[in-house]
Amino acid sequence: MTQRAELATVMDRLAVDELITAYAVAVDDGDWTAYRGLFTADGRADYRSAGGVEGDAGQVAGWLAESLALFAMRQHLIVNRQVRFGVLDHDTGDTAAVRADYLNPMRFTGDAGPTAPDLVCGGRYAFALLRTSEGWRMREVIVHEKWRRLPATP
């Protein structure tokens, strides 16, 4: 591999990391316009393993906006990112598959403020990405929730 190709791969890796981080920030901040903008025109998301819905990015953004309104605070931590670049139309690097683990603490909305109960869940994301004229975008996001800790009951 030439230095030019290696530099291009590093630049793509940085852009992919930025996209995944932008996804977490958009969900945590409730910025559903930004969320939709991270996807290709035909992009889809599947949250069924976490009790959610599957559909196009617009439909899922609507569901997220409604269901996450229960939480005053959300914080995605997306780690252990494994990135594999693929081939589309015989041009190396047009697609990427990202597998990443997540930890997601959320605080319920309520009068208790910082002492309100928390819900914490964790699992793995599978992202399918495509290089577009606007940069890297998500074609698909699949959530594989592995565990969930509910608030303790009094």
Image (cartoon, rainbow, N blue to C red):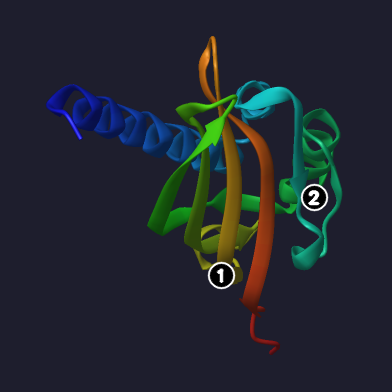
User: Front-most of 11 and 34?
Assistant: 11
Residue pictured at 43% horizontal, 56% vertical: 77
- Secondary structure beneath disc 2? helix
> Regarding mark 1 in the picture, which secondary structure is present there?
strand
| Rendered image quadrant of residue 7 | top left
Image height of 134 relative to 84, above or below: above
Percent of width and height locating residue 82: 41, 55
Amino acid under disc 2:
Ser
Q: CA distance from mark 1 to mark 2?
A: 17 Å
Nearest the camera: 133 or 120?
Answer: 133
Q: Nearer the viewer, mark 1 or mark 2?
A: 1
Q: Looking at the image, is 81 positioned above or below residue 55?
A: below
Q: Residue furthest front?
A: 90
Mark 2 Cα-neighbour bin, 10 Å: few <14, some 14–19, many ≥20: few
Ranked by sequence position, the earlier of labels 1 and 2 is 2
Q: Which residue is mark 1?
A: 122
Residue farthest toward the bottom in the current orientation of the protein: 154
Q: Which residue is mark 2?
A: 67
Q: Which percent across, then down, holds residue 118? A: 59, 69
Left or right of residue 58: residue 27: left
x, y percent for residue 38: 60, 27
Task: Return the x and y of residue 108 as percentages of the image width and height.
Answer: 65, 60
The quadrant where residue 123 appears = bottom right
Label 1 neighbour load within 10 Å: few <14, some 14-19, many 20+: many
Name the amino acid type tagged 1: Gly
Res. 110 in view: no
